Image (cartoon, grey):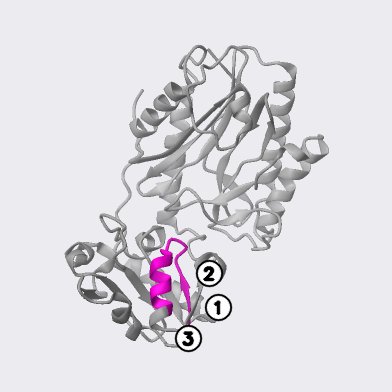
Amino acid sequence: MSPVDVQPPPPFTAEDYRARGRRVVAAATEAGLAGVLVTPGPDLVWLSGYQPTAITERLTVLLLAPDQEPTLLVPALERPDAEAAEGVRGMRVMDWADATDPYLAAAPLLRPDGTYGVSDSAWALHLLGLQAALPRSTYQSLTVGLPMMRAVKGPDELARLTAAGAAADAAYGEIVKVRFAGRRETEVAADLAALLRHFGHEQVDFTVVGSGPNGANPHHEAGDRVIQQGDAVVLDFGGLMFGYGSDTTRTVCVGEPTQQIRDVHEIVRLAQEAGVAGARPGATCQDVDRAARTVITEAGYGDAFIHRTGHGIGVTTHEPPYMVEGEEQPLVPGMCFSVEPGIYLAGRFGVRIEDIVTVTETGAVRLNNTDHGLAVVA
């Protein structure tokens, strides 16, 4: 069992981060925003490469606005770490001391009556503090104001997502070789986590192992249930590799499956295939959802498909855009997201199949390529 043979991609440069910042400023201007306030979390990592050692009550915020130099405001004690980040090089860095009001330090950087996009991960404490310092300022979530900010991936990002997908596939190729029957879900989940790390993931975000009736809960956390002969088992797992996410799901059966499990699995397989086929330039996010959902609904299981069809992926495993009814954002080349329809029969079992896809000029390419058939495990 050898690790996936993938050479680490070159690190992002300061110019890579600056180019992202320029794109964000242009998009914010087009959206009518005075600028963007980026707080610790995935947005800050994507725009600067900086992640505070601990995300605390101390205000850290990056301001990007037209006709202003990108400015990172940090607690004084964290300034050395911030300035060491690749994407912060060349930025203006300001700090505030613990004995001072950080919101008064931030206020001069903002337009008193401006509307700013703010990271979804911003603490309410900080947003309320800014509003108190600038009563006429207003704010909106970046998911609302700039939903496409991180959605379209460049070649360097796609390379990382492709590597993460291949590593997750390698983990699946090994997990189907282990014994399931007679073991707890937590034991199989631990095997999955170890395999993801073995094949190159630096971070494991989740290892869903939903056996038998637990598979009818889409986000079931692996527990102490002992997996039984005849169980369908939903395996949903992923994390970060080279800083970018993987997320894939396959459903297996312990021993010979019943006819109902076979039938439901085939419906989900066809629905997933339809969703991927619907992911093409010019279609909308909701078109992907509709394509997958129609197959399941026409098979008589519409009420058992209880979640959206997909979500974006990048520096986090869940991010905009979302493949869901009502989301009219057009698909464009470079967007990456999951296609993961499922059927969940309470008290019996669940089935889900998930791949990450990227939109190309002509359609969609899967970043997960393991067999979609119903695997039988020991």
Choose the circle earlier in sequence order: 2 or 3. Answer: 3
Residue 120: x %, y % from top left: 47, 63
2 vs 3, front mark: 3
Q: Say which element carries label 1.
A: loop
Asked whether, in this view, residue 187 is left or right of residue 288, the answer is: left
Q: Tell me the CA gap for discs 3 and 1.
A: 19 Å
Residue 57: x %, y % from top left: 31, 62
Asked whether, in this view, residue 105 is left or right of residue 305, the answer is: left
Choose the circle earlier in sequence order: 1 or 2. Answer: 1
**Residue span colored magenta:** 115-131
Q: Tell me the CA gap for discs 1 and 2.
A: 8 Å
Q: To which residue does mark 2 refer?
A: 146
Circle on res. 31: 1
Against 48, residue 312 (above or below) is above
Between 60 and 167, the one lying in front of the other is 60
Q: Is residue 117 magenta?
A: yes
Q: To which residue does mark 3 refer?
A: 136
Local packing at callout 3 (Cα closer than 10 Å; few below 14, some 14-19, many 20+) is few
Against 87, residue 193 (above or below) is above
Residue at image point 69% right, 55% down? 286
Residue 321: x %, y % from top left: 57, 57
Asked whether, in this view, residue 67 is left or right of residue 357, the answer is: left
Query: How many marks do you count on the picture?
Result: 3
Instruction: Check contact, mark 1 vs mark 2: CB within 8 A.
Output: yes
Residue 369: x %, y % from top left: 54, 35
Asked whether, in this view, residue 206 is left or right of residue 107, the answer is: right
